[in-house]
Image (tube, grey):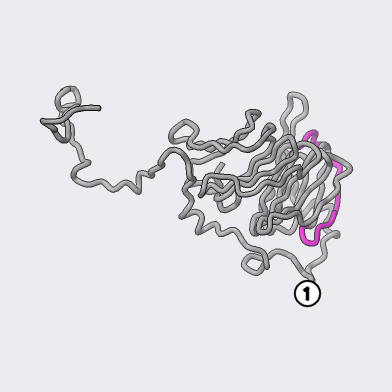
Amino acid sequence: FFPFASSSYFVTGSKDTNVKLWDYRYSHCIGMYKGHEASISSLKYSPDGLWIASGDEDGCVKIWDLRVGRMIHVFDKLHKGAVTSIQFHPLVFLLASSGTDNKINILDLERFSIISQIDTDKSIIRCLQFNDKGDVLYGGGNDYLGVYGVEPTRVCDSVVVKWGNMNELVVKDNRIVGASHLLTDVSTWLINLPEEYPFKNQFSPPDKSSKTNTMFTRDTSVRKSFNKQKSREMIKPKTNMKLIDESEIDIDDENQTVINNVHDYHSVFKPNRTCKYGYFI
């Protein structure tokens, strides 16, 4: 779904290799993006809602710009296998991807390059999630939770958990909520980080005097940041269908119509103008 609650857009991907944009106000597809050659395996909106990242079963990740309605970059064969998850950094222009090749890639979305790569030999990562500050990346796999530092990239800890096949992670207010499935069972799990943080000793407070400190802080990172407030006002995906919000419709006297009797055929279907001489082509 679109990252802002005020919008009615959502995006889907499937085995037909197409990324589709929907507006539930119209109950049908309002835009289609073609370019993948394999089934779509992962999709994510950027935090500002202007981009979509899509991954497929051939290991490719593509970036789409909704403002122009086209693909702006492809990371070809990023993984030696299917892409299992992609996740935008919550603050700056970074993207994380995981695949069946047991790799996690950190991508720079300004230069469209690979910054670093993490080996996850213990398990295939099925879902990725940054914490609110963006300095920690969590990866969920089969009975496995990995904890990774972002810049510099490092493995901070790995935790064995009996969660089955982890499919989704959400990190909010120092808590991790996970959803997993095993056969016909679906489970949800909660970790309270302040109380059960098994890797709390792995993270030391950043040295403010160090010139190599790269911990993320809003408006201070050297990387370009997502402007969520501006995007909330300007986002209008380019599609084949013109979208008009009710609040933006300029109603004048000519468009105002009052029908006193809805059962009177001539009142309902009364023309606005009459052309006495003319012809149809």
Q: Which class describes the residues within 10 Å of circle 1: few (<14), some (14-19), or many (20+)?
A: few
Where does residue 277 sit, x and y in percent of width and height? 12, 31
Look at 77% across and 69% down and name the residue there: 213
Query: In the rendered view, does 98 fall on the left or right side of 20?
Result: right
Q: Residue at x 49, y 54 (%)?
A: 232
Figure quadrant of residue 128: top right
- Furthest residue in direction bottom, as rendered: 209
Q: Which residues are magenta?
A: 150-166
Q: Which residue is drawn at the image coordinates 71% and 48% (left, top)?
A: 129
**In this rendering, would 206 be left or right of 227?**
right
Q: Inspect the magenta stretch and tell me whether residue 203 lies in it.
A: no
Q: Position of residue 144 (x, y in %)?
A: 83, 41
Asked whether 80 or 7 is in front, the reply is: 80
Q: Is-magenta flag for residue 162?
A: yes
Q: Amino acid at mark 1?
A: Lys
The answer to whether 181 appears left or right of 35 in the picture is right
Report the predominant secondary structure element of the magenta stretch: strand
Which residue has dot 1 on it? 211
Please state the horizontal and vertical placement of residue 221, each as a whole percent of the image. Answer: 67, 67
Q: Is residue 15 left or right of residue 264?
A: right
